[in-house]
């Protein structure tokens, strides 16, 4: 079954020619799942945010394991890459996002929705993150070296879910290979800890913002 998933992922990528980085193998186990009842802020959110977050969670909950899959943008592809997951989830919520993480970043800029991260951000209690809301997209650059000529060096995207009730830690949902939840690395589409890049890492947390079509409050 694992060989079949890998074959499907690379076949999908070859056909789509999408600009997300492929992975050579599935190295980790399945990611964590969560219910909206376990999220601190969920009950007070506007209905459009609730709908999008519930949709994002239900894709992971109701599908078989969806491993990281280069070029994947639908569960039928056998898995997701990072922007493919966000593309599918946002379209499920009735939005019309672009396909790649870089273009999703530019989409927010064009709609005056992006909040850029200053160079002095070292911890998640920085004032720039006070506007961060569940349902916002999170963007990283430098997680790999893109070769597709993209206009901005954005290489990873995720969706912020808020804080988990049991320990008040911030979490996100995305497709990845090697990020962790409570110290356990995983592969695929699911729940992960929101963490800043380690000191010395090539990765950079670049910004966040609300997808166009979702209310800001």
Image (cartoon, helix red, strand yellow):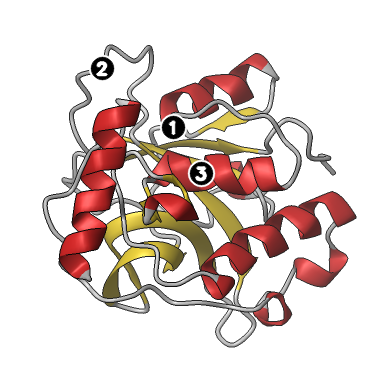
Furthest toward the bottom, the residue is 166
Helix, strand or loop for disc 2 = loop
Furthest toward the left, the residue is 24
Circle 1 residue: 101
Residue 212, quarter of the rendered image = top right
Tell me which label, 1 or 3, sits earlier in the chain: 1
Q: Residues within 10 Å of mark 3 (few under 14, many from 20)?
A: many
Circle 3 residue: 138
* Residue 209 screen position, x and y as percent: 63, 37
Question: Of discs 1 and 3, which sits in the foreground?
Answer: 1
Can residue 164 be spotted in the picture? yes
Q: Is residue 168 left or right of residue 195?
A: right
* Residue 187 screen position, x and y as percent: 29, 65
Question: Of discs 3 and 2, which sits in the foreground?
Answer: 2
Q: Nearer the viewer, residue 101 or 87?
A: 87
* Residue at x 40% of width, y 49% of height: 77
Circle 2 residue: 148
Helix, strand or loop for disc 3 = strand
Can residue 127 be spotted in the picture? no
Tell me which label, 1 or 2, sits earlier in the chain: 1
Helix, strand or loop for disc 1 = helix
Q: Residues within 10 Å of mark 1 (few under 14, many from 20)?
A: many
Q: Disc 1 to disc 3, how far (Cα)?
A: 10 Å
Q: Residues within 10 Å of mark 2 (few under 14, many from 20)?
A: few
Q: Disc 3 to disc 2, how far (Cα)?
A: 21 Å
Q: Quadrant of the N terminus?
A: bottom left
* Residue at x 83% of width, y 40% of height: 215
């Amino acid at each position: 079954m694992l060989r079949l998933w890998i074959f499907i992922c690379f076949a999908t990528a070859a056909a789509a020619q999408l600009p997300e980085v492929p992975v050579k193998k599935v190295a980790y186990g399945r990611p964590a799942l969560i219910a909206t009842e376990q999220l601190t802020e969920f009950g007070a959110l506007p209905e459009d945010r609730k709908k999008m977050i519930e949709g994002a969670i239900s894709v992971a909950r109701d599908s078989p394991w969806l491993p990281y899959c280069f070029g994947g943008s639908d569960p039928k592809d056998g898995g997701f890459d990072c922007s493919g997951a966000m593309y599918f989830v946002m379209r499920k919520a009735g939005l019309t996002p672009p396909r790649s993480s870089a273009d999703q970043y530019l989409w927010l800029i064009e709609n005056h929705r992006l909040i850029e991260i200053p160079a002095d951000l070292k911890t998640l209690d920085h004032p720039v993150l006070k506007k961060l809301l569940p349902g916002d997209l999170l963007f990283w650059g430098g997680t790999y070296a893109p070769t597709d000529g993209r206009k901005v060096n954005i290489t990873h995207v995720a969706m912020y879910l808020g804080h988990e009730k049991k320990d008040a830690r911030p979490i996100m949902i995305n497709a990845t290979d090697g990020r962790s939840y409570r110290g356990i690395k995983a592969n695929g589409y699911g729940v992960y800890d929101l963490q800043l890049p380690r000191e010395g890492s090539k990765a950079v947390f670049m910004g966040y913002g609300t997808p166009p079509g979702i209310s800001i409050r």
